[in-house]
Image (cartoon, rainbow, N blue to C red):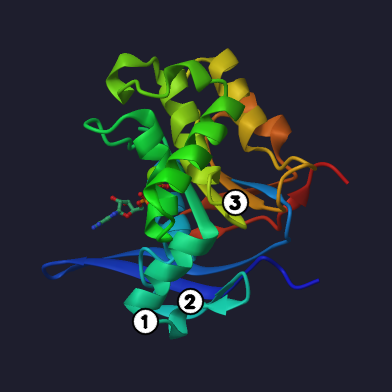
Amino acid sequence: MNPAISIRDLHKAYRTGNVITPVLKGVSLDIAPGELFFITGPSGCGKTTLVSVLCGTLLADSGEIEVLNHNLRRMTESQLTQFRANHVGFVFQQFNLIPSLTITENVAIPLRLQHRSPSSARAAAADMLNRVGLGAKLNARPATLSGGQQQRVAIARALVHQPALVVCDEPTSALDSETGREVMELLKPQPSDSPRTVIVVTHDPRIHHYASTIAAMEDGLIHQPPSAIHS
Ligand SMILES: Nc1ncnc2c1ncn2[C@@H]1O[C@H](COP(=O)(O)OP(=O)(O)O)[C@@H](O)[C@H]1O
Ligand SMILES: [Mg+2]
Protein backbone atom coordinates (compact mmCIF):
# COMPACT_ATOMS: atom_id res chain seq x y z
CA MET A 1 0.00 0.00 0.00
CA ASN A 2 1.30 3.49 -0.81
CA PRO A 3 2.01 5.62 2.26
CA ALA A 4 -0.55 8.35 2.92
CA ILE A 5 2.38 10.71 3.32
CA SER A 6 5.91 10.37 2.04
CA ILE A 7 8.52 13.05 2.71
CA ARG A 8 12.14 12.98 1.57
CA ASP A 9 14.93 15.32 2.62
CA LEU A 10 12.59 18.25 3.15
CA HIS A 11 14.15 21.67 3.81
CA LYS A 12 12.48 24.90 4.82
CA ALA A 13 13.97 28.17 6.08
CA TYR A 14 12.27 31.43 7.05
CA ARG A 15 13.74 34.67 5.78
CA THR A 16 13.24 37.86 7.78
CA GLY A 17 15.20 40.68 6.20
CA ASN A 18 18.77 39.39 5.95
CA VAL A 19 18.25 36.75 8.60
CA ILE A 20 17.70 33.19 7.42
CA THR A 21 16.38 30.70 9.98
CA PRO A 22 16.63 27.10 8.80
CA VAL A 23 13.74 25.18 10.39
CA LEU A 24 13.34 21.89 8.49
CA LYS A 25 16.82 20.48 7.87
CA GLY A 26 16.24 17.34 5.82
CA VAL A 27 13.16 15.65 7.21
CA SER A 28 12.25 12.22 5.82
CA LEU A 29 9.12 10.43 6.96
CA ASP A 30 6.54 7.87 5.82
CA ILE A 31 3.07 7.73 7.33
CA ALA A 32 0.84 4.78 6.49
CA PRO A 33 -2.88 5.20 5.76
CA GLY A 34 -5.03 4.85 8.86
CA GLU A 35 -2.31 5.84 11.31
CA LEU A 36 -2.85 8.04 14.33
CA PHE A 37 0.61 9.50 13.97
CA PHE A 38 2.06 11.68 16.71
CA ILE A 39 4.85 14.21 16.24
CA THR A 40 6.42 15.33 19.51
CA GLY A 41 9.33 17.61 20.31
CA PRO A 42 10.29 20.80 22.13
CA SER A 43 8.78 24.17 21.35
CA GLY A 44 10.43 25.79 18.33
CA CYS A 45 11.79 22.56 16.81
CA GLY A 46 9.69 22.94 13.66
CA LYS A 47 6.54 20.85 14.27
CA THR A 48 4.06 23.49 13.09
CA THR A 49 6.26 24.25 10.09
CA LEU A 50 6.36 20.55 9.16
CA VAL A 51 2.60 20.05 9.30
CA SER A 52 2.03 23.32 7.43
CA VAL A 53 4.26 22.05 4.62
CA LEU A 54 2.61 18.66 4.51
CA CYS A 55 -0.85 20.11 4.04
CA GLY A 56 0.35 22.65 1.49
CA THR A 57 -0.27 25.86 3.46
CA LEU A 58 3.49 26.53 3.40
CA LEU A 59 5.89 25.79 0.54
CA ALA A 60 9.09 23.82 1.15
CA ASP A 61 12.41 25.06 -0.23
CA SER A 62 13.58 21.64 -1.40
CA GLY A 63 12.87 17.94 -1.03
CA GLU A 64 10.01 15.70 -2.04
CA ILE A 65 6.56 15.59 -0.51
CA GLU A 66 3.76 13.33 -1.61
CA VAL A 67 0.44 13.44 0.26
CA LEU A 68 -2.49 11.16 -0.67
CA ASN A 69 -0.80 10.49 -4.02
CA HIS A 70 -0.46 14.20 -4.79
CA ASN A 71 2.98 15.68 -5.37
CA LEU A 72 2.48 18.93 -3.47
CA ARG A 73 5.58 20.61 -4.87
CA ARG A 74 4.22 20.35 -8.41
CA MET A 75 0.85 21.91 -7.60
CA THR A 76 -0.25 25.49 -8.14
CA GLU A 77 -1.62 27.64 -5.32
CA SER A 78 -5.20 27.09 -6.49
CA GLN A 79 -4.68 23.32 -6.85
CA LEU A 80 -3.34 23.28 -3.27
CA THR A 81 -6.38 25.21 -2.04
CA GLN A 82 -8.66 22.73 -3.78
CA PHE A 83 -6.63 19.80 -2.41
CA ARG A 84 -7.06 21.06 1.17
CA ALA A 85 -10.76 21.74 0.71
CA ASN A 86 -11.36 18.20 -0.54
CA HIS A 87 -8.96 16.10 1.49
CA VAL A 88 -7.74 17.81 4.68
CA GLY A 89 -9.31 18.70 8.03
CA PHE A 90 -7.59 20.93 10.59
CA VAL A 91 -7.71 21.18 14.38
CA PHE A 92 -5.67 23.84 16.21
CA GLN A 93 -4.81 24.51 19.84
CA GLN A 94 -6.86 27.72 19.87
CA PHE A 95 -9.89 26.23 18.08
CA ASN A 96 -9.90 28.99 15.37
CA LEU A 97 -13.69 29.26 15.20
CA ILE A 98 -15.32 32.31 13.63
CA PRO A 99 -16.96 34.18 16.55
CA SER A 100 -19.71 35.89 14.53
CA LEU A 101 -21.07 32.60 13.14
CA THR A 102 -23.16 29.97 14.94
CA ILE A 103 -21.42 26.67 15.55
CA THR A 104 -23.51 25.08 12.79
CA GLU A 105 -22.33 27.76 10.35
CA ASN A 106 -18.74 27.20 11.49
CA VAL A 107 -18.96 23.46 10.90
CA ALA A 108 -20.61 23.99 7.50
CA ILE A 109 -17.63 26.00 6.17
CA PRO A 110 -15.70 23.07 4.61
CA LEU A 111 -18.86 21.94 2.82
CA ARG A 112 -19.56 25.44 1.53
CA LEU A 113 -15.95 25.49 0.22
CA GLN A 114 -16.92 22.38 -1.71
CA HIS A 115 -19.91 24.31 -3.11
CA ARG A 116 -22.53 22.23 -1.31
CA SER A 117 -25.86 24.07 -1.09
CA PRO A 118 -26.45 26.05 2.13
CA SER A 119 -29.30 23.80 3.27
CA SER A 120 -27.45 20.54 2.63
CA ALA A 121 -24.29 21.92 4.28
CA ARG A 122 -26.30 23.03 7.30
CA ALA A 123 -27.98 19.62 7.64
CA ALA A 124 -24.65 17.76 7.44
CA ALA A 125 -23.08 20.19 9.94
CA ALA A 126 -25.96 19.66 12.38
CA ASP A 127 -25.58 15.89 11.99
CA MET A 128 -21.85 16.13 12.74
CA LEU A 129 -22.49 18.34 15.78
CA ASN A 130 -24.91 15.73 17.06
CA ARG A 131 -22.18 13.12 16.76
CA VAL A 132 -19.79 15.19 18.91
CA GLY A 133 -22.50 15.72 21.53
CA LEU A 134 -23.47 19.30 20.70
CA GLY A 135 -26.84 18.70 19.07
CA ALA A 136 -28.54 20.86 21.69
CA LYS A 137 -26.37 23.89 20.88
CA LEU A 138 -26.71 24.22 17.13
CA ASN A 139 -27.43 27.96 17.16
CA ALA A 140 -24.91 28.87 19.86
CA ARG A 141 -21.97 31.20 19.14
CA PRO A 142 -18.53 29.81 20.01
CA ALA A 143 -17.91 32.29 22.84
CA THR A 144 -20.86 30.92 24.83
CA LEU A 145 -19.27 27.44 24.97
CA SER A 146 -16.52 25.98 27.18
CA GLY A 147 -13.05 25.33 25.77
CA GLY A 148 -13.76 21.62 25.48
CA GLN A 149 -17.03 22.28 23.67
CA GLN A 150 -15.32 24.70 21.30
CA GLN A 151 -12.69 22.09 20.47
CA ARG A 152 -15.49 19.60 19.76
CA VAL A 153 -16.95 22.14 17.30
CA ALA A 154 -13.51 22.43 15.70
CA ILE A 155 -13.33 18.63 15.41
CA ALA A 156 -16.79 18.51 13.83
CA ARG A 157 -15.59 21.13 11.33
CA ALA A 158 -12.43 19.09 10.65
CA LEU A 159 -14.35 15.85 9.99
CA VAL A 160 -17.58 17.05 8.34
CA HIS A 161 -16.31 16.67 4.76
CA GLN A 162 -14.84 13.22 5.55
CA PRO A 163 -11.25 14.18 4.74
CA ALA A 164 -8.67 11.43 4.20
CA LEU A 165 -6.16 13.44 6.26
CA VAL A 166 -6.75 15.25 9.55
CA VAL A 167 -3.96 17.48 10.88
CA CYS A 168 -4.11 18.51 14.54
CA ASP A 169 -1.62 21.01 15.99
CA GLU A 170 -1.56 20.77 19.81
CA PRO A 171 -5.27 19.86 19.96
CA THR A 172 -5.36 19.16 23.71
CA SER A 173 -2.81 21.66 25.05
CA ALA A 174 -5.44 24.19 26.16
CA LEU A 175 -7.68 21.53 27.77
CA ASP A 176 -7.81 19.62 31.04
CA SER A 177 -7.01 15.87 31.05
CA GLU A 178 -10.55 14.57 30.87
CA THR A 179 -11.51 16.96 28.06
CA GLY A 180 -8.29 16.13 26.22
CA ARG A 181 -9.19 12.46 26.40
CA GLU A 182 -12.66 13.17 24.96
CA VAL A 183 -11.04 15.09 22.12
CA MET A 184 -8.76 12.16 21.25
CA GLU A 185 -11.70 9.73 21.38
CA LEU A 186 -13.39 11.83 18.70
CA LEU A 187 -10.26 12.20 16.57
CA LYS A 188 -9.11 8.60 16.50
CA PRO A 189 -10.11 6.79 13.32
CA GLN A 190 -13.35 4.84 13.82
CA PRO A 191 -14.10 1.61 11.95
CA SER A 192 -17.52 2.98 11.00
CA ASP A 193 -16.11 6.17 9.44
CA SER A 194 -14.51 6.74 6.06
CA PRO A 195 -10.81 5.81 6.37
CA ARG A 196 -8.59 8.59 7.57
CA THR A 197 -5.03 9.26 8.58
CA VAL A 198 -4.65 11.54 11.60
CA ILE A 199 -1.50 13.50 12.44
CA VAL A 200 -1.29 14.96 15.93
CA VAL A 201 1.42 17.43 16.90
CA THR A 202 1.65 17.40 20.68
CA HIS A 203 3.87 17.65 23.68
CA ASP A 204 1.06 16.43 25.91
CA PRO A 205 2.19 13.09 27.40
CA ARG A 206 -1.33 12.49 28.77
CA ILE A 207 -2.50 11.42 25.29
CA HIS A 208 0.53 9.48 24.02
CA HIS A 209 -1.18 6.12 24.48
CA TYR A 210 -3.56 7.00 21.63
CA ALA A 211 -0.72 6.99 19.07
CA SER A 212 -0.14 4.21 16.56
CA THR A 213 3.32 5.74 16.00
CA ILE A 214 5.26 8.46 17.81
CA ALA A 215 7.98 10.36 15.96
CA ALA A 216 10.30 12.64 17.94
CA MET A 217 11.36 15.87 16.28
CA GLU A 218 14.35 17.88 17.40
CA ASP A 219 16.10 20.86 15.85
CA GLY A 220 14.49 20.48 12.43
CA LEU A 221 14.93 16.73 12.07
CA ILE A 222 12.95 13.62 12.89
CA HIS A 223 15.73 11.90 14.83
CA GLN A 224 14.57 8.45 15.73
CA PRO A 225 12.87 6.19 13.25
CA PRO A 226 9.15 6.23 14.11
CA SER A 227 8.50 3.55 16.71
CA ALA A 228 5.42 1.40 16.38
CA ILE A 229 3.56 1.57 19.66
CA HIS A 230 0.74 -0.79 18.80
CA SER A 231 1.21 -3.59 16.31
N1 LIG B 1 6.72 32.95 9.92
C1 LIG B 1 7.91 32.80 10.53
N2 LIG B 1 8.94 33.64 10.27
C2 LIG B 1 10.14 33.49 10.88
N3 LIG B 1 10.43 32.50 11.75
C3 LIG B 1 9.45 31.62 12.06
C4 LIG B 1 8.14 31.73 11.47
N4 LIG B 1 7.37 30.73 11.97
C5 LIG B 1 8.15 30.04 12.82
N5 LIG B 1 9.40 30.57 12.87
C6 LIG B 1 10.52 30.05 13.66
O1 LIG B 1 10.79 28.73 13.21
C7 LIG B 1 11.11 27.87 14.30
C8 LIG B 1 10.14 26.69 14.30
O2 LIG B 1 8.82 27.16 14.56
P1 LIG B 1 7.58 26.17 14.63
O3 LIG B 1 7.52 25.36 13.38
O4 LIG B 1 6.41 27.00 14.95
O5 LIG B 1 7.98 25.23 15.86
P2 LIG B 1 7.06 24.38 16.87
O6 LIG B 1 5.70 24.23 16.27
O7 LIG B 1 7.79 23.07 17.02
O8 LIG B 1 7.05 25.13 18.15
C9 LIG B 1 11.04 28.73 15.54
O9 LIG B 1 12.35 29.15 15.84
C10 LIG B 1 10.18 29.90 15.13
O10 LIG B 1 10.53 31.05 15.85
MG1 LIG C 1 3.83 24.77 16.98
* Horizontal and vertical percent position of residue 173: 46, 27
Residue 195 appears left or right of 76: right
Is 188 drawn above or below residue 82 in the view shown? Answer: above
Residue bearing mark 1: 76
Q: Label 1 vs label 3: CA separation?
A: 23 Å
Instruction: Say what amino acid the circle numbered 1 marks.
Output: Thr
Residue at 49 percent across and 38 percent down: it is 123
Q: Quadrant of the N terminus?
A: bottom right
The answer to whether 155 is drawn above or below residue 49 in the figure is above
Circles 3, 2 touching at the beta carbon (< 8 Å): no
Q: Secondary structure at mark 2?
A: helix
- Report the number of discs: 3
Residue 70, position as x, y percentages in the image? 56, 77
Residue at which label 2 appears: 72
Residue sitting at the far right: 231
Mark 2 surroundings: few (<14), some (14-19) or many (≥20) residues within 10 A: many
The type of residue carrying mark 3 is Gln
Could you tell me residue 94's position as x and y percent? 35, 32
Determine the secondary structure under disc 3: loop
SS for tag 1? loop
Tell me the crowding category of disc 3: few under 14, some 14 to 19, or many 20 or more residues within 10 angstroms, Cα based. Answer: some
Q: Say if residue 168 shows up in the picture.
A: no
| Residue 67 marker | none
Which mark's residue is nearer the viewer, 2 or 1?
A: 1
